[in-house]
Amino acid sequence: MGLGNGFRVIAAIAAAIAVVPFFYIGFRAVQAPPATWINLWNGQLSGLILASAKYAAATMSIATAIGLGMAWLVERTDLPGRRVWRWLLAVPLAMPAYVGAVCAILLLRRGGIIEQMYMAATGAQAGVLPVVDVYSLGGAAVVTALCVYPYVFLPASAALRGSDAVLEESARMLGASRWQAFWRVTLPCIAPSVLAGMLLVALYALSDFGAVSMLRYRTFTVAIYSQFAGQVDRSAAAALSLVLVVLTVPLLIGEAKLARRGRRLVGDVEHPSRPFALGRARPLAFGAACVVAAAALGVPVAVLGYLSLSGWMAPTTVDRIWSVGSDTLWRHALNSLFAAGVAATAAVALAIAPAWLVVRAPGRFTSILMTIARSPSALPGILIGLASILLFSQALPLLYGGVTVLMFGLALRQLPQALATSEGVLRTAPVIAEETACSLGARSWQVLWRVTLPIVRPGIAASWMLAFVSALKDLPTAVLLRPPGFDTLPVRIWAAASESVYTQAAPAALLLLLCAVVPMILLTTTDAGRRTAEI
């Protein structure tokens, strides 16, 4: 069997694995009695659709404003320290939204850190200082946007670097101002990449569970978890899941098409644009970049560090009851690293075959397999967790309740991302090198092993790191699928924060952030990693 046929078999297996949750959720949803659908529609369905749409739209708008604005400052102006800002503004992607939500609650709630500092400085009474209502649509959208704006920043930065200055200069010669040239020439060229990032943010918002649950904003994912975990009605949970899938599929299709179009329109250019001199606005622009970096990363790290020290140096009775010592915390970290490492490895391994077929043997069958394999992008983590539970408990009861189910769910969550990045990486491998090896008598598998993979190895490693970071942060899949005695850092954060024991959530959140930031720095400081992250 040739390499192409072997890869078709592997790609078919990947597609079959990817589509299983859809069939199972659809099957359970169809089995729901009509009364369940009627009750959902009359009771909460329309409200959930509106609330989720508002949350996705608000998060997308804020993240786009931050991401596109920062990308323009970094790539098009003489902002001081542009090289440093390129990775510093991308690193907040390592910050889970639910950790950002914990920090926002501690800072902004009534009786929070800001109000306590104000009372200590002024001697005012409690309740005098107006506080921001973090438990709202605006609070949830801002917190999430600060964690996901790199989805817009990275592709927008790549597109701005890849746009040819000749186009802008031609517009300037015809009488357009610099701003008119940007809005009429540059922005339309980078629009596909920016829109793809915007849709990716919307997909994230629709799939988010941790931040909205902690900030008490009820969306589809919160309702689905309530239906399932509360044992109210599992068929109702499946029905809500099916509606959420229907809402996310158009966004998924649009994001995939726009991302491919953006990669075709942007590439290396011979005439890079000259930086725009900010003049007197330079300190203001530098301050804006500092504010974004501080709000997205600096302040949360400071809050988590302060709480961790407080819980360690002055433990309360609650802290002692929880008894979270360093040994337990490190065990949670090892569980997280192990689970994320296995999931990332499995996802990248499954992604290579369909990605290679799309790049080297395109066709209708290959496109169908790739589309099916990427379909879990339309499934938020809580739906994959729900589908995995229903599947393994019914079809594979011997594996149910073990760590295999968790690995399956995490790998399935990372498969679409691994497919997208692997496809982009394989497109960078020159076809001439493979053709030369074939002309010298090498077999197809030898060409893959000795020529293609060594060339794309840095990109594949970067793809693995990106999948690893995503799996490491995953909360809903871990909450639903972790076996007894195999708690991870996200689960520990969620459990402690749900009980408002923030001094015990903080050390786990700080350690999780440290584990995620290291690979993110590698991704944003190496050429192969940066290009993979931008895909």
Image (spheres, grey):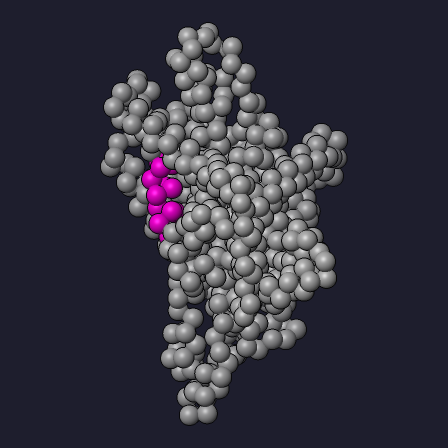
Q: Nearer the viewer, residue 426 or 270?
A: 270
Q: What percent of the width, then of the height, locates residue 510?
A: 35, 37
Secondary structure mostly seen in magenta is helix
Q: Is residue 308 visible?
A: yes
Q: From which residue to which does the magenta span run?
A: 508-519
Q: Quadrant of residue 528?
A: bottom left
> Was residue 510 drawn as part of the magenta stretch in this picture?
yes
Q: Is residue 116 left or right of residue 263?
A: left
Query: In the rendered view, does 302 fall on the left or right side of 284?
Result: left
Residue positioned 46% across, 39% down in the render: 290
Residue toward you, 173 or 192: 173
Does residue 255 show up magenta in the picture? Answer: no
* Residue shown at 37% from the left, 41% from the top: 512
Residue visible at 68% across and 53% down?
177
Task: Point out residue 172 in the picture as x, y percentages from the top left corner.
Answer: 67, 59
Q: Could you say which quadrant of the image residue 489 lies in?
A: top left
